[in-house]
Amino acid sequence: MLFLRRCHSLTRFGPLNTQRYSTLRYQVAPAAASCAVRLRSSGSDDQRSYQHARSPGWTHGLAGLLAGTGAVLAYCLHQHKAEQIDTTKVESTEKAPLPVFSQAEVTKHRSLEDGVWVTYKDSVYDITEFVSMHPGGDKILLAAGGALEPFWALYAVHNQEHVLEILSEYKVGELSAEDQKKLQAVKSSDPYASDPERHPVLRINNLKPFNAEPPPEILSDSYITPSAFFFKRNHLPVPQVDPASYQLHVEGIPGGVLTLSLEDLKTQFPKHTVTATLQCAGNRRSEMNSVKQVKGLNWGIAAISNATWSGAKLRDVLLAAGYGPDVAQWAHHVQFEGLDKDVTGTTYGASIPLNKAVSEEGDVLLAYEMNGEELPADHGFPVRVVVPGTVGARNVKWLGRIIVSKDESSSHWQQNDYKGFSPGTDWDTVDFKSAPAIQELPVQSAVTTPADGAVIDRSAGEVTVKGYAWSGGGREVVRVDVSLDGGKTWQVAQLRANDKGQPPEPPRPPGRAWAWKLWELTAPLPPDAQELEIVCKAVDNSYNMQPDTVPPIWNLRGVLSNAWHRVKVTIKEDKEEE
Amino acid sequence: MLFLRRCHSLTRFGPLNTQRYSTLRYQVAPAAASCAVRLRSSGSDDQRSYQHARSPGWTHGLAGLLAGTGAVLAYCLHQHKAEQIDTTKVESTEKAPLPVFSQAEVTKHRSLEDGVWVTYKDSVYDITEFVSMHPGGDKILLAAGGALEPFWALYAVHNQEHVLEILSEYKVGELSAEDQKKLQAVKSSDPYASDPERHPVLRINNLKPFNAEPPPEILSDSYITPSAFFFKRNHLPVPQVDPASYQLHVEGIPGGVLTLSLEDLKTQFPKHTVTATLQCAGNRRSEMNSVKQVKGLNWGIAAISNATWSGAKLRDVLLAAGYGPDVAQWAHHVQFEGLDKDVTGTTYGASIPLNKAVSEEGDVLLAYEMNGEELPADHGFPVRVVVPGTVGARNVKWLGRIIVSKDESSSHWQQNDYKGFSPGTDWDTVDFKSAPAIQELPVQSAVTTPADGAVIDRSAGEVTVKGYAWSGGGREVVRVDVSLDGGKTWQVAQLRANDKGQPPEPPRPPGRAWAWKLWELTAPLPPDAQELEIVCKAVDNSYNMQPDTVPPIWNLRGVLSNAWHRVKVTIKEDKEEE
């Protein structure tokens, strides 16, 4: 009866009813199991990969699974198990007062061998048997020995009544009063609750953590992207940082740690300003997805933006911390740690090569201003590192620590993500050690207007095509070729390095062209064409070109998507209306 | 009669006879004229462009024209004109002693307006009327006011008897005895006569100046290319330099010129060794030629080689010459001048950006050794500048002068050559100022074996594909993908950075990977295939990729040809021979 009552209660969360359920229960169980396996086989063991695992295509299915059906399935799998449990035990635990455990005792149960215990509010649960039924896979083991609240806050799908009902079945005791008090001190609210407000024009790829891009036509309207429209790529909740107590630690250089306040950074070092374009490694991933499913957020063409950044030079700060030729003898990398943390306390991390960090020409900033104003929360307030010419992922936000090291960052994002592979490499054969971490990005361009599928009136007589072009490593874009016939013939676009009405950016020394070029071409409509396939490709000053097509550069993570960008538009013939 | 006699004499040089001639004369005259126009419209005004104008395709025709028919045509055009000349004048010049002119007088006649006079041995000629008939176009104007001998030595096609006969018709006087003596001092022998011996295995693209590449299969046999097989790309005759009196002048830095002997260079500066690949901008031009004719030597895939270079760092020499932060304020380029000269005395020249020249990480050498031995004559003896990661054309050989400057080299090769353009740009629309001089080259790779058209026995069961891969700017090649099915599926090749049996090159710091990677893939023969289309593409550590196809990167100079390299081979089925 208990069983039926609970299943009945499920009708509040989905279209299922008890009658349908009993059939569904056995049919879908393998699907849930295979889903759990899938998550495991991807090697994801951190919150971000988990988010990526819920990416387009089958993600949609999984998201649904997690939001409703998945929980239902878990509930039912759990019930199926529960039926097999000795009823004597259930009765005895219902009658006798449950034992009281200390947090220390709970913490001992962190594996399938020792049992998997968790706490929720004042109760202790032994969920060992539930682990294999968890729709989110063995991610649940991260919570072993500790409190569920912060996980559930991060993965909002758990905030449903029947999830609590499942949990109650596994209760084995009470948490000691003393430890309950301590836990109350742990913030259990939604870690994303304090995320900043965002402009509604942004196209959201993922809400928590927040990932969004502006509509493409906005991009080519301003050389400097307004901060509100700058693409957002967060890996974790936006940390709340008090600028008054903020501290930046510079470590790894013999002689000790240099700790700087925000005020120190602003007053003890010259302020430099650099205009630099940042691009996510996954920009234009959607084009790879349309070839074959990849893992990652389904970015369009606007995970790229251009801003003016001001701050201290990383070089100056490293010199102040004691960097010198002796350090250069053994150090090869500069690591960065953000103040954004996952539930295990792991911070976002990345590193860049030492020579980029210490070079006068590298222009690496510890930026505290963006577009002439205080850094917005979404872009790293109070301090982010801006590594011009380098993939967005190394431009660590909410910067907490800088570590000069002989090694690259050991973070997941440096070691097992943000790397490129051959189109023939799949998740079964990938060896992340075999590829270098992405630093400089290859030459890129895209058509921002007209939009794919747009209709042009024949009477217009001409078409204006606009877009952006950029290359990594300070390589300046020197030419953009535009084709209206799918790549058969090409015209050269006009390049622009300023906002209309503003003076152009001063020319940069070679190797220090950090900012994109906007481009534009107005061309007559070909007389006989009914459709145009507009294509663009950029050339940088090392004469690197973009590859023609997506399939040969397809890779399992969907990064480095820089084939020619293609947009189809229709020409609408004028109607004779006399 | 004179006319007939001379035409008769032509039979010695070709299949023409007087009877055929009178018909041919009017038929082919327009072709010769159009040929002259062609050469003019190309904007060629220096010896090298002239060589390039005689490149494959119609070059073959033009070469023939110049070698025989062209001279015949010129001769006949000339005769046609001669017939129209007032016979009184001819008679009077035949009888009266011709006037004596000084060189100064001759030099006044350097244009069509002032008359075009030249000297040959002891005689002065007014060739004004011949200019429009010259098969080599208005290139002939370069000789105006001076001696023909050095030009004829450079362009050996003139060494034919009937050319002298044509010339004799234009004689207007004698050169003064004093000026004849001076001219005798001018070396009139073949300027290429002292060019070094070369290995017969080289495939010659042009003999004078010497341009040749090794057979591709030799390339992938050695990580370090033996100097004899290293591709040769000379723009002018190889100069004879006496190492004992050799002087290198370093100019442009306030405080005066620094002059160094070879001994100074070897003893006053630390000796550095760098392994660096050099590649001609025109490597793989033949693939562009097969899309649409371009201007330039028809290089195959082997205008690239890898050697070990030793010498003084350019940075050290510039510092010794007084380079410092004050100079960095205004200087932007370092120019190089070779000791190789054309007939006008113009030396080969090029420049590189200052930051490349003075950077510790730039590794620019004033090399006096190649592969552990004295520089060979063809590679710049006694000193060449080696600019790792940069197009061959800037690695100036037989280095005579180094000039620190705010400007790029003004040489033809820097300003109006070695630049990339859109496939839509032709010789009518090209604006050389609109494109940057090529410095760093884009990522490149090619299949060296099997050769295109090779036959593989089915019984072999597998195929081994070998090749090279390299990228400019010190960007390391991190992966080579190989396809056996024209690019549909890809496998990852094994990379190698050493000669077999030798230890691999030590890993280079990021941005300083100057040497190529050799690669190899052994794969089973696809069971059903009768033909393989083998394709390779490389990826560098900025994840730049090669473009898929040639037409979209085609450019009128045929440079930067780095699309996927494709080789077709046939699989020969085994015969049952019981």
Image (spheres, coloured by chain):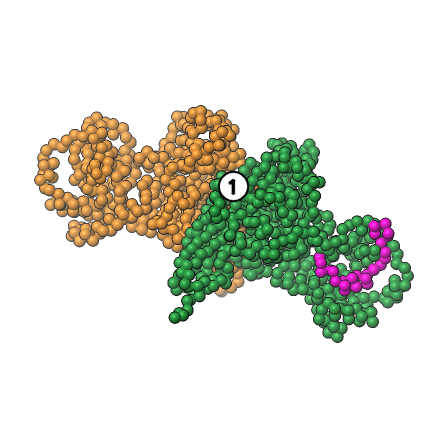
Chain colours: A orange, B green
Considering only vertical position in the picture, is A553 above or below B249?
Answer: below
Residue that numbered label 1 is attached to: B512
Subunit that carries the residue with mark 1: B
* Amino acid type assigned to the residue bearing label 1 in the image: Arg
Furthest residue toward front: B578
Q: Is residue B558 visible?
A: no
Could you say where residue A255 lies in the image, as x and y percent from the top left?
Answer: 44, 24
- A422 or A363, which is in the foreground? A422
Furthest residue toward top: A255
Could you say where residue A280 lies in the image, as x and y percent from the top left?
Answer: 43, 43
**SS for callout 1:** loop
Magenta range: B155-181
Q: Is residue A97 visible?
A: yes
* Image quadrant in which you'd find residue B255: top right
Q: Residues within 10 Å of mark 1 (few under 14, many from 20)?
A: many
Could you say where residue B318 lies in the image, as x and y percent from the top left?
Answer: 63, 35
Q: Residue at x 70, y 40 (%)?
A: B244
Could you say where residue B480 lies in the image, as x and y percent from the top left?
Answer: 45, 51
- A14 or A153, which is in the foreground? A153
Compared across the picture, whether B220 is left or right of A84 comes to right
Q: Residue at x 51, y 52 (%)?
A: B221
Whether residue B289 appears in magenta in the rendering, the answer is no
Whether residue B163 appears in magenta in the rendering, the answer is yes
